[in-house]
Image (tube, rainbow, N blue to C red):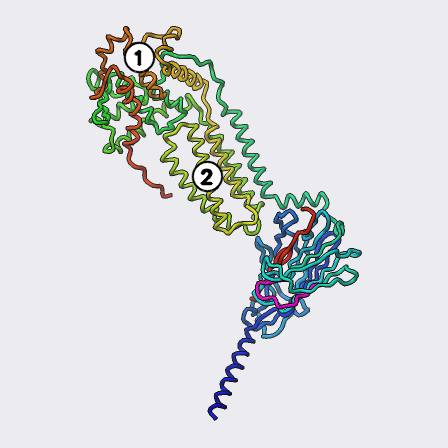
Amino acid sequence: MLNRISAGVLAAFVLLVGVMGAQADERILKFVSDIDVARDGTLTVTETITVRAEGDQIRRGIFRDIPLAVEGANGRIYKAGFKLLSVLQDGVPAPYHTNGNSQGIRIYVGDENTFLAAGNYTYTFSYETDRQIRFFEDRDEVYWNVTGNEWIFPVDEAIARVVLPEGVKASEWTAYTGGYGETGNAFEAQSVQDASEVVFRTTAVLPPYEGLSVNVSLPKGAVTPPSEADKLEYFVNDYRSELIGTAGLLLVLLYYFAAWWMVGRDPAEGVVFPRFSPPYRISPALAKYIDSRGFGDGGWVALSAACLNLAVKKRLRLEEEDSDTTLVLNRTGRDEHIPGFGLPKGEAALEEWLNGRGSPLTLNKANGTSIQALGSKFRAAIERESRDVYFRTNKRYLIPGFILSLVTIVALLAFGGLQPGQEGFVIVFLVFSVFATIISVNLGKAIFRFASMKLRMALIFVVFGLAISGAAFGAYHVNGGVESLPVLPFIAVALVALNILFFFLISAPTALGRQALDEIEGLRMYLSVAEKERLNMAKVPDMSTGHFEELLPYAVALGVEKPWAKAFEAWLTTAAGAAAAASYHPGWYSGSHFDARHVSDSLGQTASSMAGSFRSSLPAPKSSSSGSSGSSGGFSGGGGGGGGGGGW
């Protein structure tokens, strides 16, 4: 008796589990697709999908995803046309709504407030689509993903009927089953109506996320290819991002070139010849500023030259001890109440600052904050002195270029769009680009301020290019690759680079600035030659301690202090300079290692190393917060159509 009761309970349990399993067994019982190929290449597709609904996933109805991204014979991804003709449920029109996205269109069938009873339902989707025929050199081809590979339900049976234009016979056909990329052969196919129609039928259940794709080859010319006007329209639509981006880039480039041609070209160089005296009313610091077209090194070489010039004028003393240089304001023999009187702007700012400090300034880390403040005041004074006198920045001409660049980006976003699958790449690329830009800016702050203008431009573009390339590489791999790279981020990068380039190129010397550059170059020529060559120059002034000291600050400013000191040292060894060599010791300099016989090693070394002393004394910077012949092959999931669906 007990055994019979136990057996009964077990049977009831098994039956209950079976019923519960059956209730949750939602699936596609039959998927029938009729693909009617028109002579002009338009496909009229009617999909009849019979499903079993149990109230699990299919509660109100089903949805159907139809991709509109098509891969052409050349591998280019483009968007096909689509027109929804009708949506039926059990043979009668049904309520539906659609959602479009970059991948295609999703069609929801059913009413949000109406729930289905358990049972079988048949849904019919009819639509037209174009640009689905692939044209090869030796044939035309219908390559169609019948079911799609994204259904969450199994498909018990799938049938596809490809109906060709009147009088056209299929030359070859095949199909593929399985998951995306697989080439399974669980199908049978036959031609009917004298090969004007090919019917495919699966021979096994398609599990979730598996599908059926069919491939039918037609004689070449069976389908009318696009006209030249159609091709032009397709080209504009398919490549509109590239066209908009290229047009915008060319427009910005043409504008900047025109602006540079009008205001950014340097005046022609004059005749450069050795000059034996400084340019009129140009201090050593200003000579450095003009020669470098700015403070490429942070202004410390110019400041060093200003210190030397003040020292030569006996208004400052340089005291060197244990590799540290101290600036000592000389208050003897001048009016203490008028600091900076009669001096060039930069030197006046230097003297005024030292006077206000009230004590000597030693160039070391302990005085880093003070040195930084001195540098800022000195640079501001030089810039005020020379603003629009020797150079015109022409920065206002950058504004239209920036606006045109912005308009190009907006046009790309509004009309260019992104191809399917590119959104993730763009998002990751932009995020990576932000970090890459921050790194570039910090490197620029730490390194580029000590470089010349040309070197700064080269370094900026090298680092910027490497950073953006790294961002693109990282975005590509983080996003798992992308079928085709989007145009938008690369056009944006090109526009940024173009604006940076012309930021430097748009400025130009004035006529006075060009004259000053020529005179400064002539002075450099004179300061760079050896003593023997100097003596061969016409009308060269005699070397003397006064002549040497007068031009030493300019030699430091122009980076030729070593050959100038060597020339002076060579003169000291001659009979004319022997007397001076015995007694020479500049009153504005004191150092334990000074030797008149080796001026280039003592005084010259001190002069050339002072800028390094200024730089090394600065406090550490804070971190920022800021188509062909031959078979095209195929696989399940390939071709036009496809997609998938589910319940809602």
The amino acid sitting under disc 1 is: Ala
Which sits in the foreground, 35 or 383?
Answer: 35
Looking at the image, is 419 positioned above or below residue 192? above
Which element type, helix, strand or loop, lies under badge 1? helix
**How far is disc 2 from disc 1 in space, using C-alphas?**
48 Å
N-terminal label among 2 and 1: 2
Mark number displayed over residue 466: 2
Q: Which residue is mark 1?
A: 570
Magenta stretch: give its range: 200-211
Q: Does the magenta segment cover residue 485?
A: no
Q: What secondary structure is the stretch in magenta mostly built from?
A: loop
* Rendered position, 142 above or below 608: below
Left or right placement of residue 421 versus residue 626 in this view: right
The 10 Å Cα crowd at callout 2, few under 14, some 14 to 19, many 20 or more, is some
Whether residue 506 is visible:
yes
Residue 165's disc number: none
Residue plotted at (33% across, 24% down): 302
Image quarter (top left, top right, bottom left or bottom right) of the C terminus: bottom right
Q: Amino acid at mark 2?
A: Leu
Among the 4 quarters of the image, the one containing residue 329: top left
Query: Measuring 55% from the left and 68% from the top, which residue is drawn there?
Result: 57
Q: Position of residue 327 (x, y in %)?
A: 23, 24
Confirm or deny contact between disc 2 and disc 1 (CB under 8 A).
no
Q: Locate residue 227, reporting x and y percent.
A: 73, 45
